[in-house]
Image (cartoon, rainbow, N blue to C red):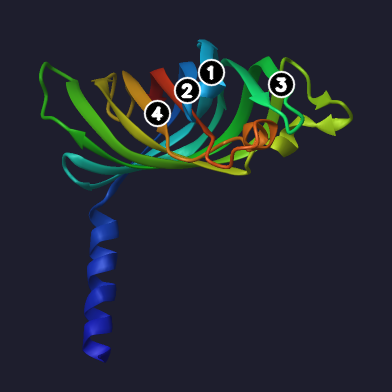
Amino acid sequence: MKKITLLMLFLCVGFTSMAQVEIGLQLSPTISGNRFVAEDRYNLEKENNKLRLGVGVVVDYFFAQNYAFSTGLMYRSKGSEISYNYTRELGDGSTERISGKDDISIQYIQLPITLKLFTNEVAPGTILYFQVGGALNTKVAAQVNNKKVIDGNKVIKRFNIFETDAILGGGVEFELGQSTKIFGGLTYHRGLTNIDDHYKKKLSDKNISVKNNGVSVDFGLKF
């Protein structure tokens, strides 16, 4: 057992010494939207996509020449304008109409956990990359219809603390010098978890869920 432990430590030290780390800054304007898991009778609809912003630090940890574990810390805004329109029958035979329109904006701190695959040079100093993985997002602020407080309640409390999403993207890197690169690409972010329990309560249906979607244009500089 002791020999195995020493061997593992030796391999880890060797792996770390061979690894290359690239750190950079990224700006990601994002076309953000929402999708729903709900019955058609509620008429939950995405009214408009919204332009949101992401900014932060990216870290690419190369464990082989063309493969890197990519993470970082991003500040991202998500959400769009959605509507609902539902008429339900009450116990006395009358009906009640429940409708509204909400412009949702939620800000998250994002921790991406992805794998990046790089090609060899397709032109002098130019390589392509493909990225796949996921992210854990923690909410830090929220607004609905540009309000942080509605009817005496803080809007941020209606949204779930954590969200996870899948990430799929690709782009191109240009080498400017010995250790400086610029990059640009497109990334699809598909929300995997429910972000808002408000509509479950509003429409009295525990099966309703609202999830984020987005496509970002990524620009960055690595050192």
Q: Where is residue 64 in the image (x, y as percent from the top left)?
A: 18, 47
Q: Position of residue 193 (x, y in %)?
A: 48, 40
Relative horizontal placement of residue 158, taking residue 124 as reference (left or right): right
Instruction: For marks 2 and 3, give the CA distance.
Output: 18 Å
Is residue 106 visible in this depiction of the protein?
yes
Mark toward the viewer: 4 or 2: 2
Q: How many marks?
A: 4
Looking at the image, the residue that sits furthest to the front is 93
Please name the residue that numbered disc 2 is placed on: 40
Q: Residue type at mark 1?
A: Asn
Up-down relation of residue 217 to residue 150 (above or below): above
Number of residues whose C-alpha sits closer than 10 Å to that of mark 1, classed few (under 14), some (14–19) or many (20 or more):
few
Instruction: For marks 2 and 1, give the CA distance.
Output: 5 Å
In the picture, the disc for residue 189 is 4
Q: For numbered disc 4, what is the local secondary structure?
A: strand
Label 2 with label 1: CB-CB less than 8 Å: yes
In the picture, the disc for residue 43 is 1
At 62% from the left edge and 41% from the top edge, which residue is drawn? Answer: 160
Q: Quadrant of the C terminus?
A: top left
At 58% from the left edge and 42% from the top edge, which residue is drawn? Answer: 206
Q: Residue type at mark 2?
A: Asp
Please name the residue that numbered disc 3 is placed on: 95
Mark toward the viewer: 4 or 3: 3
Mark toward the viewer: 1 or 3: 3
